[in-house]
């Protein structure tokens, strides 16, 4: 009941505002449409009225749309936001490296970058933030999901077509379940980087019980590309063992060391 009263009160105030705007338009001799815009940080609702008809609300289908200025690689793009260029790190995905000066170009990295450029370069996209991940990463990049003009979730598309891995950065995110399912299906269908013979796995012999527990006793684990997230481990010790065995802070192929302090998956402590 309280919510209904609040909504009703809001509509009354809205009606008064429209009447005021219309009166002002008549007094100044304006014959064309009078439009008042009420804006918030996340959406805009237009109140449109004419001198001959009632007011009505127009809710835009696209809340925010921005021009892509540059595609850095498969999971990083630059967009123009209100005249300012911002670098975006896409939430929930990780593509093989192509531009990190500390690392060699990774398998299928060029293909992932080419795919991203073919879909995003020069295009207008919609952005969605995720409060669970924060606004920016440690490199001051905005953290976002990117949606194409037709509504397609670009992050998920890259995973489902085998151009990216699902990537959980410590905490679960809004589309995590969808992205994990998309990767599993891409693996099963052997799409992109999951195709037979596309990327040869670098096998590392496990040296500690913790590492064996993390990857499965009696099995090898992969260190040449990102296949593990913090959520794959039961304890921080397990994650730390795999991190060390796969090259430590100079390598970190699974991006387990989120803040670069040498201690991985601190959320598991």
Image (cartoon, rainbow, N blue to C red):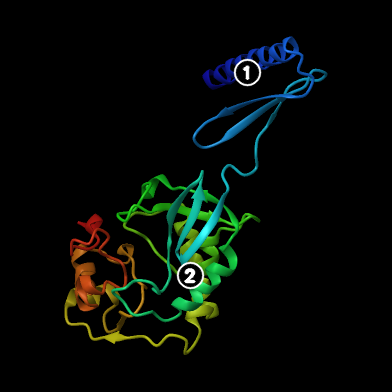
Vertical side of 76 occupied by 20: above or below? above
Other-residue count near label 2 (Cα within 10 Å), few / some / many at <14 / 14–19 / ≥20 = many
Q: Indicate left or right for 62 with 96 as reference.
A: right
Q: Looking at this rendering, what residue extends furthest in the bottom direction?
A: 197
Residue 231, given in percent of the width and then of the height, sits at 33, 62
Other-residue count near label 1 (Cα within 10 Å), few / some / many at <14 / 14–19 / ≥20 = some
Q: Split into 4 quadrants, where in the image is the N terminus?
A: top right
C-alpha distance separating marks 2 and 1: 47 Å
Disc 1 element:
helix
Vertical side of 92 occupied by 11: above or below? above
Quarter of the image for residue 217 reads bottom left
**Residue drawn at (63%, 15%) of the image:** 17
Q: Indicate left or right for 151 with 108 as reference.
A: right
Vertical side of 218 occupied by 238: above or below? above
Residue 181, given in percent of the width and then of the height, sits at 49, 65
**Residue drawn at (47%, 57%) of the image:** 78
The residue that label 2 is drawn on is 183
Q: Split into 4 quadrants, where in the image is the C terminus?
A: bottom left
In the rendered structure, find residue 130 and report the number of the disc placed on it. none
User: Counting residues from the N terminus, which is met first, the one under dot 2 or under dot 1?
Assistant: 1
In the rendered structure, find residue 14 and report the number of the disc placed on it. 1
């Amino acid at each position: 009941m309280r919510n209904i009263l609040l909504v009703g009160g809001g509509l009354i105030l809205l009606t008064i505002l429209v009447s005021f705007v219309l009166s002002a338009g008549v007094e100044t001799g304006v014959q064309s449409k009078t439009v008042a815009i009420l804006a918030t940080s996340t959406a805009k609702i237009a109140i449109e009225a004419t001198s001959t008809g009632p007011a009505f609300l127009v809710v835009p289908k696209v809340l925010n749309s921005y021009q892509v200025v540059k595609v850095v690689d498969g999971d990083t793009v630059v967009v123009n936001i209100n005249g300012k260029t911002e670098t975006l790190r896409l939430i929930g995905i990780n593509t093989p490296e192509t531009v990190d000066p500390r690392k060699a170009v990774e398998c299928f990295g060029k293909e992932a970058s080419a795919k991203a450029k073919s879909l995003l370069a020069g295009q207008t996209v919609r952005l969605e933030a995720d409060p669970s991940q924060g606004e920016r990463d440690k490199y001051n990049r905005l953290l976002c999901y990117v949606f194409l003009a037709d509504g397609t979730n670009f992050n998920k598309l890259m995973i489902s077509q085998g151009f990216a891995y699902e990537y959980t950065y410590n905490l679960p995110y809004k589309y995590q379940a969808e992205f994990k399912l998309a990767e599993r299906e891409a693996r099963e269908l052997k799409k992109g980087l999951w195709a037979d013979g596309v990327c040869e796995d670098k096998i590392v012999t496990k040296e500690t019980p913790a590492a064996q527990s993390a990857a499965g006793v009696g099995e090898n684990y992969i260190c040449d590309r990102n296949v593990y997230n913090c959520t794959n481990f039961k304890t921080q010790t397990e994650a730390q063992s795999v991190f060390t065995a796969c090259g430590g802070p100079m390598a970190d192929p699974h991006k387990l060391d989120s803040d670069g302090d040498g201690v991985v998956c601190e959320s598991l402590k």
